[in-house]
Amino acid sequence: MSGHSHWATIRRKKGAADAKRGAIFTRLAREIVMAARLGGGDLGSNVRLQLAVEKARAQNMPKDNIERAIRRGTGDDKEGGSIEELTMEGYGPHGSAFMVECMTDNRNRTVADLRHAFSKNGGNMAEPGAVGWQFERKSYFAFPASQLSYEKAFELAIEAGADDVQEDGENIEIIAPVDAFKTVTDALHSVKISPEDAGLRLIAKQDLELGVEETLQVLRFVEAIEELDDVQNVYHNLKLSEEALAALEEE
C-alpha cells in the first residue's frame, strides 16, 4: 500500500496546502469536467462524476461552480480550453519511483513545468513505461474507523470483491480491483458510509524503505511536484514509517 497507508495524515497536509494556494477548487473542477466528458453528466449513471461532485461538496465548492464544470465536460458550456489527462513517469531522490497524473489545457507547458520541477528537486523524468510497470491501478477507499468496525468493514469489503482492508487506528482503507469500484461503493453506501477519499489510484507493487531523513527528502519532493498547477495526483513507492510520519507532523 505504498504511499497510501496513513493516507489521511498526508492528505490533511496536502489539503491545507491546496487551500492556502487557492488551488483546490481548480483541481476539483478539472476532475468534474473530465468525469462528465468521459461518462456523461448524469450523476446516477456516472460513478466517477458522482464521486467528483461529492468531493467538491465536501470542500464547500459553490453549486454554480459544480454545475458549470459538468456543463463544460458535457460540451454544453464552451468556456475555457479543452482539458486532457496526462500521466508522467519519473524518479525522485534516493531512487524513489513516481507516477504523476495531470489535467491540462496545454500539454507542452505541463511537461516543461514538470520536467523543470523534477530536475530542480533532485529527480529526473523517465520514458513512458520505464516506471509504470512498478505500479498497478486499484480502487481505493478510506473512511474514519469510528464509522464502522474493522471486522464489519472487512466482511463487507471482501464480499464486494476487495483485495485488502487495513486499519491504522484512525482510518480504514479498502483496496480493490478497478472493476470492483462500483460494487464496493454500493456496499459502503448500503451501510451509510460515504468515504472521505475514494477513487482509482496507482499503487506500487513493492515498497521502498528509506531512513527518516531520506523519507522526508522524498516527501518534500512530493510537495514540490504537487505545487504545480496542472498536477492532480502524485503516486510513489515510498513506505512511510511511524518515525517518518512523526517527523513529518513536526515540520
Image: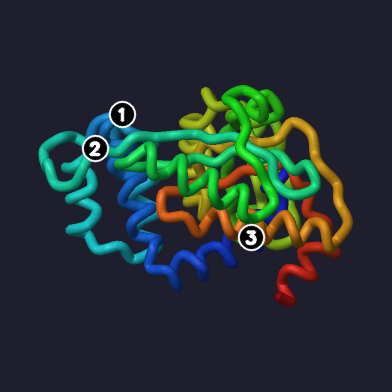
Name the residue nearer the viewer: 218 or 64. Answer: 218
Could you tell me which residue is drawn at 46 percent across and 31 percent down?
Answer: 182
Could you tell me which residue is drawn at 30 percent across and 29 percent down?
Answer: 39
Q: Amino acid at mark 3?
A: Ile
Name the residue nearer the viewer: 200 or 133. Answer: 133
* Quadrant in the picture for the C terminus: bottom right
Q: Nearer the viewer, mark 3 or mark 2?
A: 2
Residue 38 is tagged as 1
* Quadrant in the picture for the N terminus: top right
**Left of 70 or right of it: where is 110?**
right
Residue 20 is tagged as none
Q: Which residue is mark 2?
A: 82
Q: Is residue 23 in view?
A: yes
Name the residue nearer the viewer: 90 or 2. Answer: 90
Task: Give above or below for 19 relative to 166.
Answer: below
In the rendered structure, which disc, 3 or 2, sits on the residue that comes first in sequence?
3
Residue 10 is tagged as 3
Q: Amino acid at mark 2?
A: Ser
Could you tell me which residue is drawn at 88 percent across and 56 percent down?
Answer: 211
How packed mark 2 is, by other alpha carbons closer than 10 Å (few <14, some 14-19, many 20 or more), is: some
In the rendered structure, which disc, 2 or 1, sits on the residue that comes first in sequence?
1
Q: Position of residue 98 (x, y in %)?
A: 65, 40
